[in-house]
Amino acid sequence: MKFPMRKTRAGSVLALAGMLALAGCGASDPLANEPSTGASGDAGKTVVVGSQAYYSNEIIAEIYAQALEKAGFTVERQFNIGQRDAYMPQLENGSIDIMPEYTGNLLQYFEPDTTARATDDVYDELGKALPDSLAVLDQAQASDQDSYTVTEKFAKDNGLASIEDLAKVSEKLTLGGPPELAERPYGPKGLSKTYGIDAAFSATGDTTVEDLVAGTVNVGNVFTADPRIKTENLVVLKDPKALFLASNVVPVVEADMSDDLAAVLNPISAKLSAEALIDLNVQSTVDQKSAEDIASAWLGSNS
């Protein structure tokens, strides 16, 4: 607890004693070690943080939870709930106050026929599509979405940074991915239509990364938060023409609490980069660390 400085007459022993007493209070008052509540009038309120039944989503939820606790909120965790159909009704009725989400996938949940694809377009449309009881805070640069990915060596050998750079590759391109990719709008037909790049297709399924590393395919459909992007030295190609639906990490919150929660969660989103999310996932899948330990370490380095 901080106390204001007070002026006192030099000859007043009583006033001096009062100042010493106040100084002692400031040093020993247990409130001095309480988490800062900032300007929020809701710090101290119990908030419920949920997560999907997915390790990466749970890590993000745990980061939110620990940051809120540090800010003075009492947090109840309801993790591993399941998929969107299971937890969205709980968000809408107020049983859950905060949920880490993904912009594009959530937009399609509310607007299945949306044509938005680019990051900012998806985010803006999502804000309009949500029920009045919900709001989205700032989105992170980190995402968990489809991408076209290549090995680091293939990128260096061919000077690749974006999907459109594939046009200058002299060797035959073979795209690997799940069987359904063949007919998806962002599959080989979409690649040809959007970027003018033709590629053969190989249904690699669950072995896409392995085939990419082995050279069986030279372009793979890999999710942008896959920890193997780091462990296998892969490069996610930028998508300047928005072939893929952007799905950036974003907190979905109770609308009435959005201002108070934004003060805590927006700074987290500002620091949650694509590389950071991949690294968090590596700590879970490779290092076998708990979500609590991963979150605590990340917050310690990003506070």
Image (cartoon, rainbow, N blue to C red):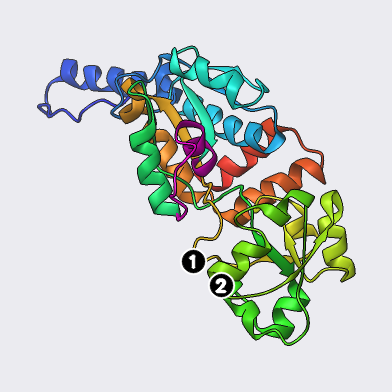
Q: For marks 2 and 1, give the one nearer the viewer.
A: 2
Asked whether the beta carbons under mark 2 and mark 1 sit within 8 Å of each other, the answer is yes
Residue 29 seen in render: no
> What's the amino acid at mark 2?
Tyr
The residue closer to the viewer here, 297 or 142, is 142
Q: Is residue 199 above or below residue 65?
A: below
Q: Secondary structure at mark 1?
A: loop
Q: Is residue 212 left or right of residue 279?
A: right
| Above or below for 53 versus 162 | above
Q: Which residue is mark 1?
A: 241
Residue 219 percent coordinates (x, y): 74, 68
Which of the labelled discs sits on residue 195, or is there none? 2
Quarter of the picture containing the N terminus is: top left
Q: Which residues are magenta?
A: 103-118
Question: Where is residue 86 drawn, in percent x and y?
Answer: 61, 19
User: Per the image, is 144 magenta?
Assistant: no
User: Considering only order in the chain, which callout, 1 or 2, is on the residue closer to the N terminus?
Assistant: 2
Q: Residue at x 77, y 84 (%)?
A: 171
Image position, residue 169 (x, y; %): 70, 84
